[in-house]
Image: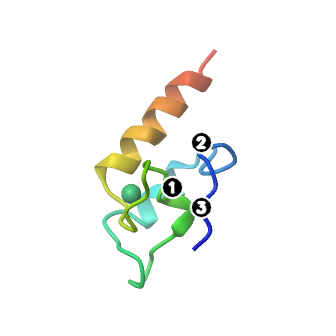
């Protein structure tokens, strides 16, 4: 599975994260681009939201 860094992933798209929320690899709705926690764990959960929120706040002016 490809794993990029956080850069370029989920750029401020909360809806994308929400639609994949609490899914795991292979499940309907799973979106690998949302697995942004490091290391990735093939599940979209609070760890990913935490990374997302940090990036989101970091981008605010
Ligand atoms: Ca994850």
Residue 2, above or below 45: below
Residue farthest along the top direction in this orientation: 61
Q: Position of residue 25 (x, y in %)?
A: 41, 77
Mark drawn on residue 6: none
Residue 42, above or below 4: below
User: Which residue is nearer to you in this view: 42 or 29?
Assistant: 42
In this picture, residue 14 sits left or right of residue 26:
right
Of circles 3 and 1, the one toward us is 3
Instruction: Tell me the quarter of the image containing the N terminus.
Output: bottom right
Q: Neighbour class for label 2 at 10 Å: few (<14), some, many (≥20)? A: some
- Kindly report the distance in space between the C-alpha atoms of the residues bearing marks 2 and 3: 19 Å
Residue named by callout 1: 15
Dividing the picture into quadrants, the one containing residue 44 is bottom left
- Determine contact: label 3, label 1, CB under 8 Å: no
Answer yes or no: disc 3 within 8 Å of ligand 1. Answer: no
Q: Position of residue 6 (x, y in %)?
A: 59, 45
Dividing the picture into quadrants, the one containing residue 3 is bottom right
- Determine contact: label 2, label 1, CB under 8 Å: no
Residue positioned 62% across, 68% down in the render:
2
Ligand 1: give its quadrant.
Answer: bottom left
Residue named by callout 3: 3
Q: Upstream in the sequence, badge 3 or badge 1?
A: 3
Instruction: Tell me the quarter of the image containing the C terminus.
Output: top right
Residue named by callout 2: 12
Q: Neighbour class for label 3 at 10 Å: few (<14), some, many (≥20)? A: few
């Amino acid at each position: 599975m490809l794993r990029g860094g956080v850069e370029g992933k989920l750029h401020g798209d909360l809806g994308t994260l929400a639609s994949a929320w609490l899914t795991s690899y292979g499940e309907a709705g799973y979106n690998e681009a949302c697995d942004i926690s490091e290391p990735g764990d093939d599940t979209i959960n609070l760890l990913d939201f935490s990374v997302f929120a940090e990036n989101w706040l970091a981008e605010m002016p």
